[in-house]
Image: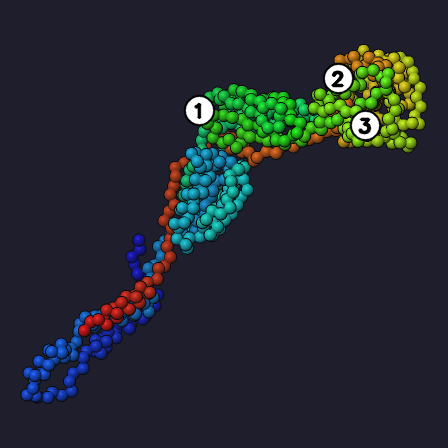
């Protein structure tokens, strides 16, 4: 502590030369003449009775007066304690990367760092200029009062893009000290300059690094490929569990035996809930230090769950009803009668006539699957018997991978199919006469065959259920399963077993400001004058 006192205006000390004058003025006046009296004894007795004494000088009264004068003189010279040398600025580098979310007890490493900051900065002298930089995730800068109170620092997340070593070296000067608070994760080294506070977060950690979704929309099947990796200290096998819950018909738990630092892909098939919702994937590992990167959430749209209406000629047989019932059971829909006031998502027609095509040939955008059905009243059709040979497209989404080599058609109709992409045809020499077409209208599509179900053996083929299913899927278009995930740690924050290590370094002694003492000397002089009033 600096005990030296300096003066801003030392020339006022010349006023101390007036102390002899004060001594002379404080002396009692001398009698102008002496009178000889025969009543001296009586006068002395009277003075004793009145408890009065003749005027005389008092060293104590003069000392108090001199003390007051000295206090006023020194106060006028403006005394002060000179400032001590030391930095007057503080720059705080606070690591807010994902690994700082590691919880010990009831607080995360980030919360412990924030509490330590608040306590330390609150004790700093007000003249210290404080700047706080949140490093990691979104970079934030706080200055002055906001920095001292650690306002609006958010939560840790993301990677540590900022180079703490470079920032510390740039900010450290003779007048500025840097204080770094970090756990050292994802860093080659920690700053070697300034103060340092290390917050331990090392330990095992399991991570979901990626999720790939293969959606069979509008069917309930959902195929997931989940990439997982685990890190342990020391390297040892880890028993983890991948749990799927939420928007699925049945929650699932898949056991995973993970080798430290070795990525593994877990493939799982689930049946999504008809109502859609959030499908939560959680990788559970005992003692996991950073559970936030074990979670992924998939937002699944609801399934159409359509009503399938059936319209069939009286002699068309039961095939259309059975096919509609099987399809509705697979997609959680229902079969309804085609009646006025009944809404249907898809129409399955076997034979007859349905008004879907206008006079100009434009086809209404409906989800329709027709077999040997006329679409406009003007359409004329001529039957032809046993068209053969029959071929099909190997690249169409409806027939890719299907075997229709056993397909036999007893009767088909010409000129009833609308314009569309042919996927099934009769080979007539060099010509291909369409027997099945796909009319793609973007979000909706319709599929049309030139023959009735009962006029062929198509319902009896193993490929028929797949053909029905694909026609339904294509009629509802495609949808993207949106992935809504919390912010996860980057690759540099996954392995919590080998952080950069260093010993803590305390903050240095900060410089002080000049401390003025004039008011204290004024107070001392006033106290001396107050005591002098009681001294006789």
Query: How far is the residue under mark 1 from the one under mark 2?
Result: 54 Å
Q: Residues within 10 Å of mark 3 (few under 14, many from 20)?
A: few
Query: How far is the residue under mark 3 from the one under mark 1?
Result: 70 Å
Mark sitting earlier along the chain (3/1):
1
* Helix, strand or loop status at disc 1: loop
* Helix, strand or loop status at disc 2: helix
* Helix, strand or loop status at disc 3: loop
Depth check, front residue: 211 or 324: 324
- Mark whose residue sits in front, 3 or 1: 3
Q: Which mark is residue 419?
A: none
Work out whether 188 lies above or below 320.
below
Identify the residue at horizontal 7%, vertical 83% (top origin).
Answer: 42
Depth check, front residue: 349 or 186: 349
Residue annotated with mark 3: 339
Q: Which mark is residue 234?
A: 1
Along the horizontal axis of the image, is 78 left or right of 398?
Answer: left
Identify the residue at horizontal 41%, vertical 55% (top origin).
Answer: 127
Residue annotated with mark 2: 465
Q: Residues within 10 Å of mark 1 (few under 14, many from 20)?
A: few
**Residue 227: in sight, yes or no?**
no
Percent x, y for residue 364?
Answer: 84, 31
């Amino acid at each position: 502590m600096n005990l030296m006192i300096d003066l801003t205006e030392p020339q006022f000390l010349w006023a101390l030369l007036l102390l002899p004058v004060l001594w002379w003025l404080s002396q009692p006046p001398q009698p102008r003449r002496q009178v000889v009296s025969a009543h001296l004894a009586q006068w002395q007795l009277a003075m004793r009775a009145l408890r009065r004494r003749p005027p005389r000088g008092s060293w104590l009264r003069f000392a108090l007066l001199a003390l007051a004068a000295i206090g006023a003189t020194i106060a006028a010279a403006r005394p002060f304690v000179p400032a001590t040398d030391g930095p007057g600025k503080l720059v705080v580098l606070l690591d807010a990367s994902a690994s700082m979310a590691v919880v010990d007890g009831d607080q995360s490493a980030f919360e412990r760092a924030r509490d330590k900051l608040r306590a330390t900065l609150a004790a700093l002298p007000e003249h210290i200029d404080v700047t706080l930089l949140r490093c990691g995730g979104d970079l934030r800068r706080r200055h002055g009062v906001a920095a001292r109170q650690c306002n609006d620092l958010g939560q840790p997340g993301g990677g540590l893009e900022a180079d703490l070593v470079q920032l510390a070296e740039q900010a450290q000067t003779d007048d500025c000290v840097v204080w770094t608070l970090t756990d050292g994760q994802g860093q080659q080294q920690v700053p070697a300059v300034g103060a340092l506070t290390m917050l331990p977060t090392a330990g095992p950690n399991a991570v979901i690094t990626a999720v790939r979704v293969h959606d069979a929309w509008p069917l309930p099947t959902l195929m997931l490929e989940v990439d997982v990796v685990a890190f342990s200290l020391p390297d040892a096998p880890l028993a983890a569990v991948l749990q799927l819950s939420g928007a699925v018909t049945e929650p699932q738990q898949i056991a995973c035996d993970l080798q430290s630092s070795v990525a593994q892909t877990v493939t799982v098939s689930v049946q999504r809930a008809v109502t859609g919702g959030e499908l939560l994937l959680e990788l559970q590992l005992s003692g996991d230090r950073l559970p936030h990167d074990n979670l992924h959430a998939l937002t699944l749209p609801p399934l159409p769950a359509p009503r399938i209406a059936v319209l069939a000629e009286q002699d068309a047989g039961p095939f259309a009803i059975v096919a509609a019932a099987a399809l509705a059971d697979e997609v959680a829909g229902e079969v309804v009668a085609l009646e006025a006031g009944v809404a249907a998502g898809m129409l399955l027609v076997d034979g007859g006539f349905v008004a879907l095509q206008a006079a100009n040939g434009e086809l209404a955008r409906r989800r329709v699957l027709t077999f040997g059905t006329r679409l406009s009243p003007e359409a004329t059709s001529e039957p032809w018997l046993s068209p053969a040979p029959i071929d099909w497209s190997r690249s169409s989404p409806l027939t890719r991978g299907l075997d229709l080599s056993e397909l036999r058609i007893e009767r088909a109709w010409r000129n009833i199919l609308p314009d569309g992409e042919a996927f099934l045809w009769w080979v007539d020499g060099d010509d291909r006469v369409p027997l099945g077409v796909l009319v793609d209208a973007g979000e909706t599509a319709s599929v049309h065959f030139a023959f009735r179900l009962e006029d062929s053996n198509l319902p009896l083929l193993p490929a028929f259920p797949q053909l029905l299913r694909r026609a339904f899927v294509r009629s509802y278009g495609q949808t993207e399963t949106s992935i809504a995930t919390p912010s996860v740690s980057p690759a540099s924050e996954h392995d919590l077993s080998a952080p950069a290590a260093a010993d803590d370094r305390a903050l240095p002694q900060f410089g002080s400001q000049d401390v003025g003492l004039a008011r204290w000397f004024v107070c001392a002089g006033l106290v001396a004058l107050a005591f002098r009033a009681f001294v006789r």
